[in-house]
Amino acid sequence: MAAAPTVISQDDLLGLRLACQLITTDASGPRDVASTVRRMFATQSQDFAQSVWGIGLRTPGAHRSDVLAAMASGSIVRSSSLRGTLMLVAAEDLRGILTLTAERTIAASRTRQRRLELDEETMSRARTVVETALAGRRALPRDAVLRRLENAGIRTDAQRGHHILWLLAERGIVCWGPPSGTQQGLVLLEEWIAATRTVDREEQLRRCVVRYFAGHGPATIADLAWWGSLTIADVRRGIASAGDALCEVTADGTDYWMTSDEHSRPLAVGTVALPGFDEYLLGYSDRSAALTPEYVERVVPGSNGIFRPTIVAAGRVIGTWRRTLLKGLWQMTPEPFEGLTRGQARAFEASAEAYREFTSW
């Protein structure tokens, strides 16, 4: 008979999430950019600059140049993968993620593909054009690739170009590699990422489940099903095959899963400024533990899908912040929901200084 889940408080739940997401006061031990991304498994990255800072704040001593260098070396990549959304992942993980998620994600977009007249003949022609343009480990920015498609007689207007590149990424043909200005260059996945050992789907599913809970726990089955474009049945099978690697906890009557080696009281963290689209919120389908419903509109105005940078204190979102460039220096302005205490204001300014230091390299 399975042991009953350990009962934890909401404070413990949020503290454990902060620890699993590497948002803690613990800077002990070496950690580089690639290992941070690997620990998180995948992080939201449709906003390039914000996602770079999301990795930086989780990697003690890292600067923007370190994250860009990891991209340039090919140790981390950015690609459409989970939920069809741009994510940052360790290069060796991308193929496995696509094996689990791409088929369902592509199938869900069939109506959109028909509306844009992206049939298999068109996609085959587009693939040939893109593979020719990028052959030999060449990296090209998005606009240059779209021009190649237009020159070949393949329309890219009305979001067709975006969807063509999205489909090629979901099919494992391209990904985003080395930095190119404020974005990244598009590359051929097979040329850019070294071959990895193929494992069967059940083993890949087990790995996905363990890796997600290691970087996001405690989280629910529904959280992972949403985050990973998986079925509830898939997640349950992955948990069953993970065995003792995972443990179950409960908070306020809701059951959560996490990795067994993280089941200890985390180090406290005070107030921190997190980037927009950060995995601390975007890593879960239910965000109510960290963000109370009355303030959702302040973080996602008009429910437009644009998540603003947040101020988090003891695991709870207490405000947002904005940045402006003044005389070459980033100024970060807090916009708290109900005001900041002196301690929170000092901690926010420390985060602002850390951000300025991060971006100065």
Image (cartoon, rainbow, N blue to C red):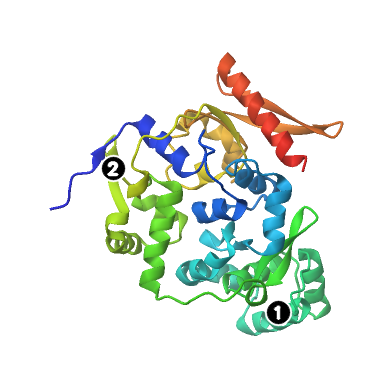
Residue 260: give x, y in percent of width and height. 32, 49
Label 2 sits on a secondary structure element that is strand
Residue 194 lies, in percent from the top left, at: 60, 74
**Kind of residue sitting beneath label 1:** Ala
Image mark count? 2
| Residue 13 percent coordinates (x, y) | 37, 36
Relative to residue 305, is residue 68 drawn left or right?
Answer: right
Q: Residues within 10 Å of mark 2 (few under 14, many from 20)?
A: many
Q: Earlier in the sequence, mark 1 or mark 2?
A: 1
For residue 126, the mark is 1
Q: Nearer the viewer, residue 191 or 233?
A: 191
User: Is 307 placed left or right of 357 in the picture?
Assistant: left
Q: Residue furthest top?
A: 342
Q: Dot 1: within a 10 Å radius of its alpha carbon, few (fewer than 14), some, or many (20 or more) residues?
A: many
Residue receiving disc 2? 249
> What's the residue type where badge 2 is placed?
Val
Mark 1–mark 2 CB contact (< 8 Å): no
Judging depth in this view, the residue of 29 and 166 nearest the camera is 29
Query: Which residue lies most toward the left here?
Result: 1
Q: Which quarter of the rendered picture does the C terminus lie within? A: top right
Q: Residue at x 43, y 36 (%)?
A: 288
Residue extending farthest front: 29
Q: Residue at x 28, y 47 (%)?
A: 248
Q: Is residue 173 above or below residue 213?
A: below
Residue 82: percent from the left, percent from the top? 52, 60
- Residue at 43% across, 56% down: 211
Please name which of the two marks, 1 or 2, marks the residue nearer to the observer. Answer: 2
Question: How far apart in space, not on screen, are marks 1 and 2 (Cα)?
Answer: 48 Å
